[in-house]
Image (spheres, rainbow, N blue to C red):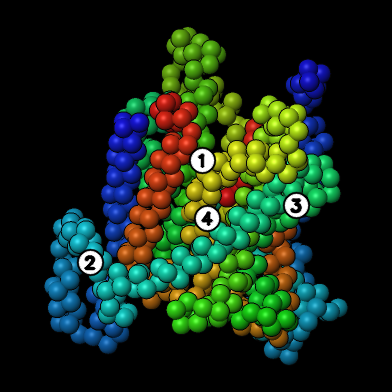
Amino acid sequence: MNTQLAAGRDTPLWRRLAGNGPVLAGGTVAVVFVLAAAAAPLLAPYDPARADFQAALQGPGWSHWLGTDDLGRDQLSRVIHGARASMQVGVLAVVLAFLVGVPLGLVAGYYERFTDSVVSRVTDTLLAFPFLVLAVGLAAVLGPSLLNATIAIGVSLVPQVVRVARAETLRLKHLDYVQAALASGGGPGTVLFRHVLPNATSALLVQATVGIPAAIISEALLSFLGLGVQPPDPSLGVMLSGAQPYIAAAPWMAVFPGIAIVAATLAFNLLGDGVRDVLDPKGPKRGGR
Amino acid sequence: MTRYLLRRLGQSGVTLVLVSIVVFVGVRAMPGDTARALAGEETTPEALAAIRAEYGLDDNIAVQYARYVQHALTGDLGTSARTGLPVLDAILDALPVTLELALFSLLFAVVLGIGAGVVAAVRRGKPAEWAASTVALLGLSVPNFWLGIVLILGFAIALPLFPASGFVPFGTDPAENLRRMVLPAVVLGTGLAAVVMRQTRAAMLESLSADYVRTARAKGLSPWQVTGGHALRNSLITVVTVLGLQLGQLISGAVVTEQIFVLPGFGKLMIDAVFTRDYAMVQGVVLFTATAYILVNLAVDLLYSLIDPRIRLGGAR
């Protein structure tokens, strides 16, 4: 056990991450997704919005690897562009949630008492809405679009980020080195951002890896319900919703976008599980959302 | 205990008030004009003014909120702009559908999740554990709306065993009601089953290495008695708590599942209301959901503090 611990401390973080199976497998697929999303216009063989009624509802074949939809649009191109929308929302929503949630959590944990009560009541209010009810409600208020879906999902993720940041601050602020920083005259801002935040990174990183797949699924879901990306723009959720009437005649329309969503979320979930194991070997495995 | 109870009650009360304000203001911020939605497409300015006066839409928003709360407390959640019927009636009509769906998916999740979790813990390091864990990870990663479409494709179209959509009340035809609930319950229960399986496995692994289990083995109990009677019983506390925490996921999932299988439940009521700009309905449904969610969470918390004295005595959360 001692040797294991010693090895754990000496090995650089990237080495430990690279040596972890789930991180490697999930990370590889996640990187492929990110690259495909970034290079979507270069990779997609066709214009994802171009209709070709001559080629409507074709099964997978040489000219259209994943078949075509009811308007004859190339499914592969639409899946690639849809993955781009998913990744955009996944990353931006988590960034938004962190930009709002981390400072709130730090302040709530640091000042406790009144500030903590206010922040906690606000997070409790947000948490009082089931995730999707909140996201649907926000998307309905803001109006359906990719940007608004991102905002709605980001805001829905805020309470969990606040909770993690707050808990970490509460834990860290009583430690000797933080007390020492305070005693030597460091202001709250310096202490929080120089001493508390860097040490809360691993817990927050784990939260981020949980947030991205949740955001990807939520985007697909909101778009599926008609509250996210608007047709004809491609999104994996829009594709699934458009596939429903043709499910018997053209099952590939529903199968491939779904596989893309599953692959992306599975990859990020694996990555998240692995990162959690590496950063927090003693921590309990949480069940996910 | 009384202090903890009172504090928890107070917190829930404050959250409820904040939730009602958020919902009220949020619904007023929705694009579109309530009066126009009530009047319909073809209308005159005079008719709009009359509707505004009738519903008090010209009043200060604080006055409108106070009136809404006053009515809500007497069970009047307003009138649906689309059907002209009381919102509360629509909610009470939809509630049994969603509750039935939730009940069956919970049942599915508990039976499958606990069973697989126990097998994974007992057969640690064997193919059975690997298989159960992989299926659980898949269950967490497959979005339920896609699972719904795939199951319809498989068991309603390719193998027509179950209907693809629609609802029959239990009172009308119990057998048909159950037949139509199978696919939706599986769709809604799968993600939950995965969570239950992971929690059961983790709790069982902990129990199985505990001293009392070793004692039970040492005094010659059969493996069945040790696993079922001792280890599982103590693991169930954790599992029950996790189920309570998953309630939000269950409600979110129900919204989607009802949409796919065209079940006239709570979720479908909400989505339809959003799309038809039926503000009173959106407000009523969201408020009702949030209230139920807060109350159930409160109940779970209180129950848990009864089960686990550490929470009750520690007090600090």
Q: Name the residue under label 1.
A: A161
| Image depth: mark 1 or mark 2 in front | 2
Report if the CB atoms under discs 4 and 1 are less than 8 Å apart.
no
* Amino acid type assigned to the residue bearing label 1 in the image: Val
Under circle 2, the secondary element is loop
Q: Mark 3 points at which residue?
A: B132
What amino acid type should be assigned to the residue bearing mark 4?
Gln
Q: In this view, does A16 lie to the left or right of B227?
A: right
Vertical placement of B190 versus A78: above or below? above
Q: What residue type is labelled 2?
A: Asp
Q: Mark 4 points at which residue?
A: B249
Task: Identify the element where label 3 is drawn.
Answer: helix
Q: Mark 2 points at which residue?
A: B76
Residue B117 placed where, x, y %? 69, 48
Chain letter belonging to callout 3: B
Gap in Å between the C-alphas at discs 3 and 1? 30 Å
